[in-house]
Structures are given as C-alpha cells and as structure tokens.
Image (spheres, grey):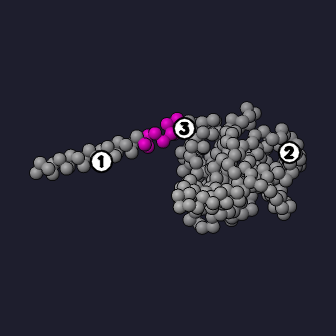
Amino acid sequence: TSIAHINKITELLRHAEPFKPDVVVLPESSSFTTYYLNNTPHRLRDIFGQERAVLVVDSARLYNSEPSPERTFIYDTTRGLIAVSDKILTIPGGEYISYNVRTLLTLIGRKDAVNTFDRRRTILSGAYVPYSNLDPETQPLGVQLCSAVHAPSLWRDITRNHAKILVNPASQGLFKSSSFHQQELLWIRFLAILYDRWFVQSSNSGFSYIIDPQGRIRFETTQRGYQALLGTAGYRNSTVPYLFLGDWPIWVSLVIIAGSVLKIRRYRNASSGEK
C-alpha cells in the first residue's frame, strides 16, 4: 500500500468529516487498517473527533507477499475494531479458475495449468462470518466484498441476521466496459428492492451509489475512482417474503409451467391422433 494511496484515502475522510457522517464505507482494498495496524482507531479519532461514534468499513489483504484472504474490518471510532469477516466469493478473472474451466482443463490433460494458476493466485477464499447484528450498541450493517455482490444467498443470510443497511465495498478494476457497470448497477438496484433495504456501493474504479429500497438512485459519484460520495440512508428492519421462502416459489412456478406446457402438448397430440 503506497503512501500516496493512504494520503488520498485520508483526504477523502477529512472531506467527509464536516458533514458529521454516522457511517463511512471505504472502497475494496483501501487498506487503511493494514497500513496503520494498531494505530487505526487513533488515526480515525484524529479525523472524526474523540467523542463522535462513526462506523468505518475498511478492507485489505491480510498478507502482501503470499496468497491471502481479503478481510473486511468494521470500526467504531469510539471503541475500536468491532467486527471482521473474510471475502469468500471470488471471481474468474485472476482470483480462481471457475469449476467448469478447471474441469475442462483436467479432461484435456492440462491439470498442470490448473496447478500453476493455483500457485500463482493472490486472493484466497476466507472463512465466512456473518457480522450483521454484530453489536447491540450499533445499527447492524450487512457487508459483502466486491464480487460477493452477485451471491443472493449471502445477502439473504445477512439480512435474515438483521442487517439494516446493505453495503458493498467494490473494486471493479478488471472491468473497463460501461456495459458491465450498467449491469452491476441494475443488479444492486434489484437487491435493494428484493430485500427492502438501502444499498450502498463504494467503488475505487467504478462509480459509487446510494440506492433506496425502491431501487432508485438517490446519490452517485460523477466520476470513476477517488471521490467522496455524501448522502443519507435509513436503517430498515422490515421482513420480506424472500427472506424465508428463498427461490422456492420460482422453482415451483417453473415446475407448474413446465407441467402445464407438457399437458397441453399431450392434449394436442391426442387430439391430432383422434382426427
């Protein structure tokens, strides 16, 4: 982590301080924690003051010189570190080889390529610890790092554990096309509606958003990269059917539709035979 990067993160935090934020979400791999280590709470109090309690979400690789999980750190500026959790869902773009590609390479006799890739990869899947409802004195955040945004089951898990705001620190550095960013935006708007929660995405290579439970973009950055996004969001603890039913209604509906189509075809075939 470079000094220039940390200075930029510090500058953005100081820019936010006059607005007295309750929650600050840094983009993926901001590494404020691993740079300052045990001095992190002190540095945050220098910025936000000694008395105000601000929740700060940071993330970083645990080790720079070897394959490592990526960890999220949640700080309360008055009490220090209150929760950690590792990223468990990675993406096929440098972090792991997806199972279908891995199987294909093995079948065609290129298992050596798989082994070489595994030795060289830098991000490893960590141990999942849902830290929603992490502390009775704080309003719980539900946080998933970067590519885990595409795992509805993880969001469902943390929302069932009483997460009241959904948060996604992201990088998006691998994706340059505007079509990807548009798809990502549509997806997080859908998640906000699905779980009836405010959704906050903080990106260091894409745009950052604050989205309301109706899927409307309430606040967004005007450029990609380093920029402070200031806005408001509300804690919600409403219960939606999907939290308990999951995807079962969809699968049951598909079975009913498939059965109906099959029955209609059989009826038509029988009618044609009678003629």
The residue at which mark 1 appears reads as: 261
The residue at which mark 3 appears reads as: 243
* Disc 1, SS: helix
**Along the viewing direction, whichever of 125 and 258 lies nearer the viewer:** 125
- Which of the image's four quarters has the N terminus? bottom right
User: How much space separates mark 3 and mark 2, taking CA atoms?
Assistant: 35 Å
Q: Is residue 12 above or below residue 262?
A: below
**Amino acid bearing label 2:** Pro
Pick whichever of labels 1 and 3 is earlier in the sequence. 3
Q: Position of residue 261 (x, y in %)?
A: 29, 47
**Along the viewing direction, whichever of 256 and 168 lies nearer the viewer:** 256
Lateral position of residue 140 relative to residue 44, left or right: left
Residue range highlighted in magenta: 240-251
State the residue at coordinates (72%, 36%): 134
Q: Quadrant of residue 194?
A: top right
The residue at which mark 2 appears reads as: 41
State the residue at coordinates (83%, 38%): 79
User: Does residue 86 belong to the magenta stretch?
Assistant: no
**Amino acid bearing label 1:** Val
State the residue at coordinates (63%, 60%): 112
**Amino acid bearing label 3:** Leu
